[in-house]
Amino acid sequence: MTMKKKVILYTLLTVSAFLMFFPILYAFLISFMQGGEVLKGRIIPSDFSFTNYSAAMQKVPLLRYLFNSFVVASLIMAGQVIFCCLAAFSFTFIPFKGRNILFLIFISTMMIPWEATMVPNFQTIRSLGLTDTYFGLSVPFFAMAFGTFLLRQQFKTIPHEMYEATQVAGVSRFQFLWKVVLPVSKTTLVTLAIYSFLTAWNMYLWPLLVTNDEQMRTVQIGLKQMQSQEVSTEWGVVMAGAVLVILPTLILLFLGQKRLQEGLTRGAIK
Amino acid sequence: MIAVKDQIRVRPKSKRRFSTLLEGLLYLLPSILLFAVFLFYPMFKTIYLSLFLTDAQGNTQTFVGLEHYIQLFQSTSFLSSLKATVLFVLYTVPAGVLLALGLALLANQKLKGIGFFRTIFSSTMGMSVAASSVIWLFIYNPTIGIANTIIKTFGMTEMQWLLNPDTALLSVALPTIWMNTGFSFLILLGGLHNIDSSLYESGKIAGVGDFYSLRKITLPLLSPTLLFIVTVSLINSFQTFGQIDILTKGGPMESTNVIVYSIFKDAFVNFNIGSASAQAVILFTFILAVTILQFKWGEKKVHYQ
């Protein structure tokens, strides 16, 4: 690579990185500003004090919201990983009649937009008395076609001879799943887990519908609430709230970026 | 005698086949059950509800047939909602995919410190709709937000980004593109990694330029991944809700009242559940049509390695 090309590339990379990251950086900087500074339209805060953060915690039960989101996202992550593993295993290693048709039905569920079913789903959860519960917030999302597909792609890379050998040795299918399939599929499982957690943490419409109780709100809805209450004057506090909401997922993403990229591509194109 | 022998041989086999079927279904049972309760049943229920007048609780009262659909296609409000949805898709999908592709091509270079740039480019994948929207609401703030500060330094006059019906939809599209870039970038970068690098080597030996190898090697081999990203972006774009709810609430003058927001408002604010269900069925039809078209088109144009 020539020097000139290198310079051009680094310039392009730096400029785009700055533009892409700017909104996040901006929120971070505003979150340290006091009311007056924000109104002057400044970009760099005069000092980095955490008063906005403690104010954000006092204004709304932010820690409670964070805890709720953590519970809901973890439940959905665990549910999706378990349900998808079982389904993908059946689709790969159990040669029963009608398997292909069932698989097609699974895949076709990706075409049903979740929003088109939200009214009856809301009615179901309400009639079961499950509004404002972790159960109602998480269980409807446990089954996922994309995850099943992703894991099936991975399971298919396991040599079939291995499966046949365990069958001859009289090992049960479940033991084969537990002792062989899962350990060799670790990367894909981690990918799916990160993806599930991120998506669940960022859910917006469903928690908006099924939570009324202040104590059960997830952090996304809490942030919206905070923003509509704290209009104009307290932007610093609202931004502190926003930073607290994105911090967990940003950290998760920074740690898992490489894995996520490798694992997701595998499911997307093969 | 022969028949009896055959029976003896056949029975355990068919029994085994049956137990295989049972076991196969057992593993699928949790997912099938959930899909049935939270996807197939509500989809049929939505279609059913769209044919009825209901009370505020959603209990059906009178059968009205296709009346809701007829009314929707005669209502200016719904037609403007459809228009907003289609425009929004056109604003966000091509620009979003091109941006992500550009970033992925840049980040696919073998340079020192490239990992840092990759992390930054994928960072918006960790951004929630709520947090992103709150940040952009501030960016667009007419008096203290940075959007107006920037355009003023370029000598333009201040704008009422989200309050002007002419610019509101575009102003919501911009953060949406930004938010979706992280995911698309990550997938496209992965797609680029999977392209056999020996192809580029032989291209280099043959003396072809960068632009030529991009057009003749990279893009054709990336086309399955591109197709996937376009489909996902399209479907996501049709389902936009959170940023509308926080940034504009469907206004001003219904210019950003995209279909999911309209469904939400009709179902949970106006309690007109029949009409909301009819809109949901229309949304479903849209997405189904788009997906089928994509795959039809994909079969012809996409190159698989």
Image: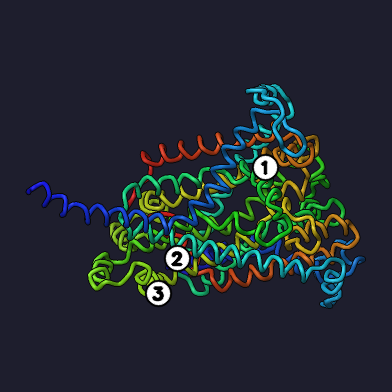
Residue of label 3: A183
| Residue at the image point whose x is 51% and y is 70% from the top | B114
Mark 2 or 3: in front is 3
| Residue at the image point whose x is 43% and y is 72% from the top | A186
Q: Chain of mark 3?
A: A
Which image quadrant for residue A269?
bottom left
| Helix, strand or loop status at disc 3 | helix
Which image quadrant for residue B58?
top right
Work out whether mark 2 precedes mark 3 in sequence or the reverse, and give the earlier one: 3
**Residue B144 place in picture, x, y as percent:** 85, 57
Residue of label 1: A119
Q: Is residue A207 left or right of residue B228?
A: right
Residue of label 2: A262
> In 3D space, how far apart are the residues under numbered discs 3 and 1 (Cα atoms)?
40 Å
Instruction: Name the amino acid type tagged 1.
Output: Val
Q: Which of these two is toward me, A142 or A197? A: A142
| Helix, strand or loop status at disc 1 | helix
Q: Is residue A72 left or right of residue B209?
A: right
Note whether residue B98 is visible: yes
> In 3D space, how far apart are the residues under numbered discs 2 and 3 (Cα atoms)?
18 Å
**Residue B64 place in picture, x, y as percent:** 67, 23
Residue B186 is marked as: none
| Helix, strand or loop status at disc 2 | helix
Mark 2 or 1: in front is 1
Number of other residues with Cα within 10 Å of mark 3, as a class: few under 14, some 14 to 19, many 20 or more: few
Work out whether mark 3 precedes mark 1 in sequence or the reverse, and give the earlier one: 1
Q: Which of these two is toward me, B86 or A134? A: A134
